[in-house]
Image (tube, rainbow, N blue to C red):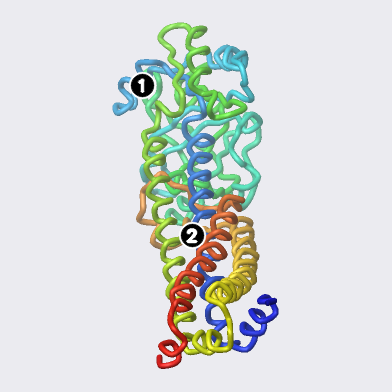
């Protein structure tokens, strides 16, 4: 007996029930895809943020700075940063080496003052996404006493382009020094902590911090993250004492915490998958048990038990296939759209009081794995769940089924 045309006709005949079941399957599929892709994107964004704006893949500093980091020992610095960068670029898989100077201190402007933190960077040799960060104005010209400030710092202080700010900091000689910079631009760092920072040209950072020819650190970037451990050992063997090269995984505990976080996040995604399966299971089982009398009629007109089981299996497969396809298409579109525009948590008012080193924008990333998991959940589980109660109901005698 040809069961497929009968299955399709039954789906059409029970239109409202089929639409309800299909909606539950589509929604569960969409949520499953978005949750998995969001978690994968958040983890990737966090790794990228730490690597590009904090640690690099391999970080070179004076070993004594690593030891006394909590005291901010600025007098322990990389004295000849240019030669260290050239040495770093000899490392296998090296892509780029950048030097930075950390500038903690006080900001004075318009008769006011507040604590501040900034970086001196070479704007022509950086891995930061300068094009994507600039909100207003322009970046400092080479060699000029100019600066750009974070959007949150500008909002809290009322500073604008054209204003002048004096930066007072402790120098490598353990004295104090101050330089007045003009603001040329406002930037939006992809980091909840750095949104209150400022950036100045590297040469002026060296003068301000009293590090002629030096830098706080040299960061090395490689072709792949997994090369960092071997690269740090290779570079360390060529560095003079007391400089030390360390891989990113040895520098920031957050990388290790994120490994645990990823596991927790995927457990959470698994919960949503399980919740979606529960909705599907409940919907399909009710769909079958509501039709026990229909099963009795089919048995009484000559349908075999195996044919009834296959009929309900085909109905469930038909509904789940169409619903899963709709859910996958909508889920993929939602992930693509949010990935393009970003989920901008940094613009939420609540984030003004949050002082965590975390990205301000999350970009979900479409994953074939997520699509496969969602498709299997929707079609595989739905079909199996519909077949099990249908087979059980088909075992009933026609008289018993008709009396239900």
How many numbered marks does the figure carry?
Answer: 2
* Foreground of the two, 50 or 41: 41
Q: Is residue 350 left or right of residue 26?
A: left
Distance between mark 1 and mark 2 Cα atoms: 34 Å
* Foreground of the two, 375 or 271: 375
Q: Indicate whether 155 appears above or below 62.
A: below
Identify the residue under disc 1: 66
Q: Indicate whether 218 appears above or below 156.
A: above
Identify the residue under disc 2: 347
Task: Say which element carries label 1.
Answer: helix
Task: Say which element carries label 2.
Answer: helix
Q: Return the mark for residue 299.
A: none
Question: Is residue 378 in view from this perspective?
Answer: yes
Residue at 51 percent of width and 34 percent of height:
51
Residue at 53 percent of width and 78 percent of height:
21
Q: Quadrant of residue 279?
A: bottom left
Of pointers 1 and 2, the one earlier in the residue sequence: 1
What x and y, as percent, mark residue 287? Answer: 49, 81
* Foreground of the two, 27 or 25: 25
Neighbor class of circle 2 (other Cα within 10 Å; few <14, some 14-19, many 20+) is few
């Amino acid at each position: 007996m040809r069961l497929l045309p009968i299955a399709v006709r039954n789906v059409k005949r029970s239109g409202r029930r089929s639409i309800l079941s299909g909606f539950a399957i589509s929604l569960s599929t969409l949520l499953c895809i978005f949750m998995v892709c969001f978690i994968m994107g958040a983890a990737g964004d966090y790794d990228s943020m730490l690597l590009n704006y904090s640690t690099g893949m391999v970080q070179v500093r004076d070993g004594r700075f690593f030891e006394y980091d909590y005291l901010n020992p600025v007098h322990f610095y990389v004295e000849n940063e240019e030669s260290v960068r050239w040495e770093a670029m000899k490392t296998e898989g090296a892509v780029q080496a950048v030097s930075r100077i950390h500038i903690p201190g006080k900001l004075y402007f318009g008769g006011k003052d507040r604590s501040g933190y900034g970086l001196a960077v070479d704007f022509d040799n950086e891995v930061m996404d300068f094009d994507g960060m600039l909100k207003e104005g322009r970046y400092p010209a080479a060699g000029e006493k100019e600066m750009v400030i974070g959007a949150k710092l500008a909002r809290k202080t009322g500073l604008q382009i054209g204003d002048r700010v004096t930066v007072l900091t402790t120098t490598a000689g353990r004295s104090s020094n101050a330089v007045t910079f003009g603001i040329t631009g406002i930037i939006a760092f992809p980091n909840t902590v750095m949104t209150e920072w400022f950036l100045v040209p590297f040469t002026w950072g060296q003068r301000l911090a009293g590090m002629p020819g030096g830098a706080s650190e040299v960061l090395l970037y490689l072709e792949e993250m997994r090369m960092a451990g071997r690269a740090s050992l290779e570079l360390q063997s060529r560095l003079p004492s007391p400089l030390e090269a360390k891989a990113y995984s040895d520098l920031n505990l957050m990388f290790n915490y994120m490994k645990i976080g990823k596991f927790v996040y995927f457990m959470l995604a698994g919960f949503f998958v399980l919740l979606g399966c529960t909705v599907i299971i409940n919907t399909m089982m009710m769909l079958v048990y509501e039709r026990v009398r229909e099963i009795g009629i089919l048995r009484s007109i000559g349908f075999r038990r195996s044919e009834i089981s296959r009929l309900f299996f085909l109905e469930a497969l038909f509904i789940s296939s169409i619903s899963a396809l709709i859910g996958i298409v909508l889920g993929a579109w939602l992930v693509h759209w949010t990935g393009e525009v970003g989920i901008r948590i940094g613009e939420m008012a609540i984030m003004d009081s949050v002082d965590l080193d975390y990205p301000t924008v999350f970009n979900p990333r479409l994953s074939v794995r997520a699509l496969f998991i969602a498709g299997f959940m929707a079609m595989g589980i739905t079909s199996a769940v519909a077949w099990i109660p249908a087979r059980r109901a088909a075992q009933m005698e026609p008289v018993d089924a008709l009396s239900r």
